Amino acid sequence: MSPLLEEIWHNPLLWLLVLVPVVLVAQALNPEAHTLLFVISVVAIVPLAALLSRATEAVATKTGDTIGGLLNATLGNLTELLIALAALRAGQYVLVKAAIAGAIVTNSLFMLGASFLLGGLRHHVQEYNRNSARLQAGLLFLATVAMLVPSVLVDSNETPKAVSFMQTLSVGLSVLLIIIYGLGLVFSLKTHRELFTGADHAEAGEAEWPLALALATLAGVTVLVALVSEIFVESVQQAATAFGLSPAFVGFIIVALVGAAAEMVAAFSAARKDRLDLSVGIALGSASQIALFVAPLLVLVSYAIGPTPMNLQFWPGAVVMMLIATVTASLVSNTGRSAWFVGSLVVAVYLIFGLTLYLLPPRVQ
């Protein structure tokens, strides 16, 4: 247990783990204190996400590049997935779809742009493997198109025939996206892996975890994230009303930022160390994972755990923002070079979206 305890001792972010038992006890003692439970659960998810990311990284180190890459791809967004599953089970589809759209926009704009900005403030010009950025941006654009099509085909009458068509189309698109996701992993990790190799930067001083400890931590943290996510979802509606926020804003901004907190810390730290390959890989890779795997998976899982099946029909504002975010990320990452001003422009696009959602929430279906 010493590596885990040392990790907690030397990482101030993990000190917030003390809030996990606090929120569980508060839920048991006063389940009606929705605003308090919302605030504590949001903060408690952040260190859990960080620990989950560290355990995933430790397991990936032990299993080799191919399996490790697959593990990182499937578990990198586990926090967002667990929150979305809790909301799905509660039938809060507005929150689920807002979280999906928000995660895509947050990762491809805020995380990427802030990485460029923070790295550029220390290094004059930074370079990275543009082949990897192009692949991830291309996959992300494909997924955005798949979400655009059912969102454009809106039938205001909501006839049984139209609903059936939308559900069938959503399931078909979900299966297709998951297949493309798998093919992308094979392409980048197996058949053409030499095209996506960045500069080798050994991370000194990083204590290795035994595989058993990493797996146990992964399992334990996953359970805790699931429990805290349940509390978060149960309190989000009342808390949003108390703060004057819409479920769309909560999902699009707050859930996305909280769920990606651990990945952001890693991406920003790597950018400051001139490891922009890692930062771009985390930002765009996480966005494409959400779009190609998490969103389709939620559609399929909704048939088992949701009150009604979920579809891929998003409100128009979310589709427009996802499309703009994808195009922006593709344009700025196409050259393989970056400077701080480029990052500031990308972050500004994200702030425009955030301000718009806060002041004038989109009209959702």
Image (spheres, helix red, strand yellow):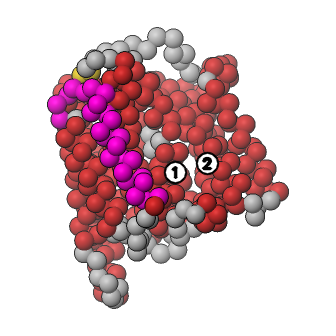
Provide residue 170's location: percent of width, then percent of height: 31, 68
Q: Amino acid at mark 2?
A: Val
Residue 216: name its quadrant: top right
Label 2 packing within 10 angstroms: few (<14), some (14-19), many (20+): many
Left or right of 8, for residue 323: left
Left or right of 262, for residue 331: left
Observer-nearest of 59 and 270: 270
**Residue at (51% x, 51% y) in the render:** 255
Helix, strand or loop at label 1? It is helix
Alpha carbon of mark 2 to alpha carbon of mark 1: how far? 8 Å
Q: Which residue is mark 1?
A: 254
**Residue at (39% x, 38% y) in the render:** 111
Provide residue 41's location: percent of width, then percent of height: 65, 49
Find the residue positioned furthest to the right. 29
Residue 37: name its quadrant: bottom right
- The reply to whether the magenta stretch includes residue 298 is no
Q: Which residue is mark 2?
A: 42
Is residue 183 visible from the viewing direction of this image? Answer: no
Provide residue 215's location: percent of width, then percent of height: 56, 33
**Residue at (28% x, 31% y) in the render:** 341
Above or below — where is 269 with respect to 236?
Answer: above
Is residue 41 visible from the viewing direction of this image? Answer: yes
Give whichever of discs 2 and 1 has the lower sequence position.
Answer: 2
Q: Which secondary structure type mostly characterizes the magenta part of the structure?
A: helix
- The reply to whether the magenta stretch includes residue 352 is yes
Q: Tell me whether the residue at label 2 lies in contact with that at label 1, contact meaning CB atoms closer than 8 angstroms.
A: yes
- In which quadrant is the N terminus drawn? top right
Observer-nearest of 50 and 274: 274
Provide residue 138's location: percent of width, then percent of height: 20, 45
Above or below — where is 281 with respect to 44?
Answer: above
- The span shown in magenta is 334-358
**Residue at (53% x, 45% y) in the render:** 258
